[in-house]
Image (spheres, rainbow, N blue to C red):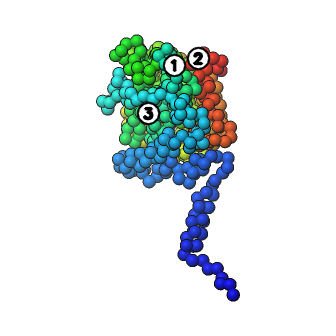
Amino acid sequence: MQTPFRLRLPHHLLLLCAAYVAYLFRGWTWEENFIHNVLKVFPALPPVDPIRGRDVAVQVDYLAGATRNMEVLMGRAPGFLMQYTAGPEIAAASFGPAATKVVRINATTCTSSSGDAPPMTCTCPHDAGTDDTLPLVLYFHSGGMIVGSVDAELHYARYIAREASAVVCSVKYRKAPAHRLSDVLEDVVGASAALLGSSSSSSSTLGADLVRSLGIGGIDTSRAATFGISAGGYLAAMVPRHLAAMRQEEKDSSDLVAAIRVQISMAPMVRPLADTPSMVEHFHDAPDWSGDHNTYAWSALLARDRDGDGTQACDWQANLMADLPKKESGTTAAALPPAYVVTATKDILRDEGRAYAEQLRIAGRLIEHVEYNTNHGGLFPELSRRGPADQALSRAVQVLSDRLNGGQYVVE
């Protein structure tokens, strides 16, 4: 007589493990790539509820872990994995014979209120030599100004450098909750002004040091651009606004604004604590940037604004929808660089991005507004290797390259 099969302890454990795996992957979809599906289960950016109201040091340590996760999943992925997650073109700019040259340098001509010069990482095509003078792209990383790093998105900067034949510099800026929005802007605006105002003709300048380190002939700072995704898209728009404001203070920034030929803002944060239909609709359904993350980020950035009463949320120095006051900038939005704006249909930032693009169109500063049928993370190559959003970054780089070289993309 055959002995009946009985579940023993190992079998119970196997069944429990199988049930747990099935539970974890209940949201798995074939329309998204492996990394995006993993992020649904183990999000790189954890929930912020556990640190609300906690000591700042505790919050900073908690968010630093998220930044390390982003670096591992994105910027520090090995070449074979990056080929799958971000695509072969992006991987080729970071690995192999065509990998771009990378140098790290400090904006020594710009010292922040902390007393330190903002560090920058700059990259250019591998075959650029001493006979080449390249345009300049200022790249700002994402992360809501609370997480993220230059290293997490260095592969994007290298891809842009290779495809646009440009020097791409990414600024390491201070982040909340340890620092305020004014500190973030001080870093990115100061470093941008230092780079745009540098000249490689003098051996004592930042530009000359960078040129020597990269082994190229020069940097044409009259052909410049700003570029960023999410918080980076916000900073890409904020830098020209603050440079315009510097005119009135006689800091010789008028030519700096004119040198920026295009601003690329993909899925940008636009204004603090926006209450839009898309914010309400998608508040909880994004693993990469939810309404909770957005609300926490703005609250941390504006927790100790300069007036202490929350008015900075409506100020032109924090809100992209606020008009530039003539008394401070001597200009209007019409004098700012032309912009290419990207939004996503399932993004909490969709409606404010649409409103910002429409404002630019009315002011005559919109090159194009493109909206992809995806969520916020779908505009990052790692998070969308299928569907219409696959080409969001490559198309943005095409517009960038075209504008830097006087091509066909014109303002609407």
Vertical placement of residue 42 versus 156, above or below = below
* Callout 3 amino acid: Gln
Snapshot quadrant of residue 306: top left
Image position of 141 (left or right of 373): left
Label 1–label 2 contact, CB within 8 A? yes
The residue nearer to you, when weighing 13 against 254, is 13
Label at residue 312? 3
Up the image or down, 255 lies above or below 386; here it is above
Which residue is situated farthest in the front direction here? Answer: 97
Q: Residue at x 50, y 48 (%)?
A: 44
Q: Position of residue 204 (x, y in %)?
A: 34, 16
**Is residue 171 positioned above or below 407 on the image?**
below
Please give the name of the residue rendered at 54% of the width and 40% of the height, measured from the top-left corner. 79
What amino acid type is highlighted by mark number 2?
A: Asn
Which mark, residue 405?
2
- Which of marks 2 and 1 precedes in the sequence? 1
Q: How many numbered discs sit on the rendered protein?
A: 3
Question: Residue 409 location in percent, x, y?
Answer: 64, 20
Q: Is residue 324 left or right of residue 277?
A: left
Q: Residue at x 57, y 65 (%)?
A: 17
| Residue that appears at 61% across and 24% down | 399
Secondary structure at badge 3 equals: helix
How far apart in space, not on screen, are marks 2 and 3 (Cα)?
Answer: 37 Å
Of 235 and 77, nearer the camera is 77
